[in-house]
Amino acid sequence: MAIAKAERLMNLALCLLGARRPLSKRELRGSIEAYLEAGSDDSFNRMFERDKDDLRELGLVIETVENLEGEVGYLARRDSNRLPAITLDAEEAAALGLAAKVWQQARLAGAASGALQKLRAAGLPEDVDPYGSHGALEPRIPVHEAAFEPLMLACRDRRPVVFDYRKASAAHPETRHVEPWALECWRGHWYLAGFDRERGAERVFRLSRITGKVRARGTGFTAPVPDVVTVRETVRGWAGETADRSALIRLRRGAGYPLRARATKVRELGDGWDELEIPYGHGLDAWLVEFGPDVVVLEPAELRADVVDRLRAVAKG
């Protein structure tokens, strides 16, 4: 039986966090059962790279270290992945409770309720109303993501759907008949991966480009659901962000945590700055500008020029 992806990611995270030294791919493969079942070296390498990217996307800081023999090792230092003790006042608890109501609207009431129970177990006073004075507000998933709930249920129930979809390059939407596999959020947008019946192949759809209602159509899938659904890899390809393109930046120590979470390599410079290697794709210049003086772009030259131009535009404005 295939080991669930969530269990595989947890085992990899625990392995990296518990190691006292960087572990090579070979050592990780021998320590994690799911990797032993991966089959060929190519299958293992693809699975491991996806898992490593997923953990970084979730916020785990994974360092890449090269030893004296030239072998690459991986390590997640506890001091880089430790959060301080979390305490909540009444207003903060109310904000979290309000956020939980979004998921209650999306039929995830069980998970939202469980999260609030854990907050109380962690010390939230019983007399604090988690919805506070904001109880009159009814937060919902934004209208432009209205397809989220029916697609989430369709993925869960393995039920084919039909919807109208407008591609970025098209003037008018087209009707798509899809067997939905998984929903993932990347860079603030939700995406659906599934089997497009007309095209006879896997496709990824951005939910904000779905127009009208998502309609259920019949039962049963005609194509097998893959063990691994590569939503993020596909979207990165759209953005031109691939594994062989990277940018080198200097980042002030203690700043830019989101950048550190995405870094493939980190090197301490010893002068209050770190050197990071991060994936380079469309829109990176705009993102780096948000970190202001805490970031200095080293290369490539065109990215450095784009960031400088954006900063000058902000200064003139």
Image: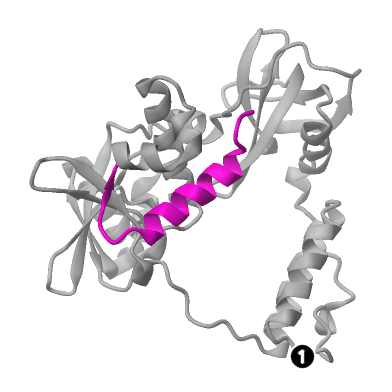
Write the residue at 36% across / 47% down. Answer: 284
Query: What is the magenta range?
Result: 1-24
Write the residue at 72% across / 21% down. Answer: 173
Please tell me whether mark 1 sits on a helix, a strand or a loop: loop
On the image, the x and y values in percent for residue 153 come to 83, 38
- From what the image shows, is residue 47 above or below residue 85? above
Relative to the observer, which residue lies in front, 153 or 228? 228
On the image, the x and y values in percent for residue 224 come to 69, 16
On the image, the x and y values in percent for residue 56 come to 43, 51
On the image, the x and y values in percent for residue 142 come to 75, 52
Residue 21 is a magenta residue: yes
The image quadrant of residue 150 is top right
The residue at which mark 1 appears reads as: 125
- From what the image shows, is residue 305 above or below residue 117? above
Quadrant containing the N terminus is: top right
Q: Is residue 282 visible?
A: no
Q: Amino acid at mark 1?
A: Pro
Residue 224 is a magenta residue: no
